Amino acid sequence: MIYKVFYQDSKDNSPRREQTKSIYLDITADNELKGRIIARQLVEEKTNFNVEYIEALSEKHLAYEKETGAFELTEL
């Protein structure tokens, strides 16, 4: 399943909505909750990002993201 992770570049600064960025991760898990946990662990272990929110993308949402050109899988 593909997860969209919303984050700030640094844990040192206060979050600002205007500076929120996102990455897409392909996570294999038994269910959506475990996928979110795995995604958070990966991001926290391999980056200095401040994770704001993680959402699992439905097929329609994924198709929209691909259509807009914003979609690019990130490998951590």
Image: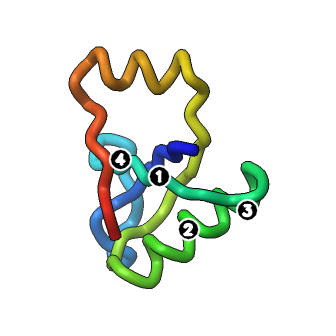
Q: How would you rate the neighbour count of disc 3 (Cα within 10 Å): few for under 14, some for 14-19, many for 20 or more?
A: few
Task: Name the kind of residue labelled 4 in the image.
Answer: Ser
Q: What whole-number distance in Å separates the C-alpha atoms at marks 4 and 1?
A: 14 Å
Q: How would you rate the neighbour count of disc 2 (Cα within 10 Å): few for under 14, some for 14-19, many for 20 or more?
A: some
Residue beneath the point at 30% across and 56% down: 74
Task: Mark 1 vs mark 2: give the one in front.
Answer: 1
Task: Name the kind of residue labelled 1 in the image.
Answer: Asp
The image quarter in which residue 66 lies: top left
Q: What whole-number distance in Å separates the C-alpha atoms at marks 3 and 2?
A: 10 Å
Measuring from the top left, give residue 24's x and y in whole percent.
Answer: 39, 47
Mark 1 residue element:
strand
Q: Is residue 20 above or below residue 57?
A: below
| Mark drawn on residue 26 | 1
| Mark drawn on residue 22 | 4
Q: What whole-number distance in Å separates the C-alpha atoms at marks 4 and 3?
A: 20 Å
Task: Name the kind of residue labelled 3 in the image.
Answer: Lys
Q: Earlier in the sequence, mark 4 or mark 3?
A: 4
Measuring from the top left, give residue 72's x and y in whole percent.
Answer: 26, 41
Residue beneath label 2, please?
40
Residue beneath label 3, please?
34
| Mark drawn on residue 47 | none
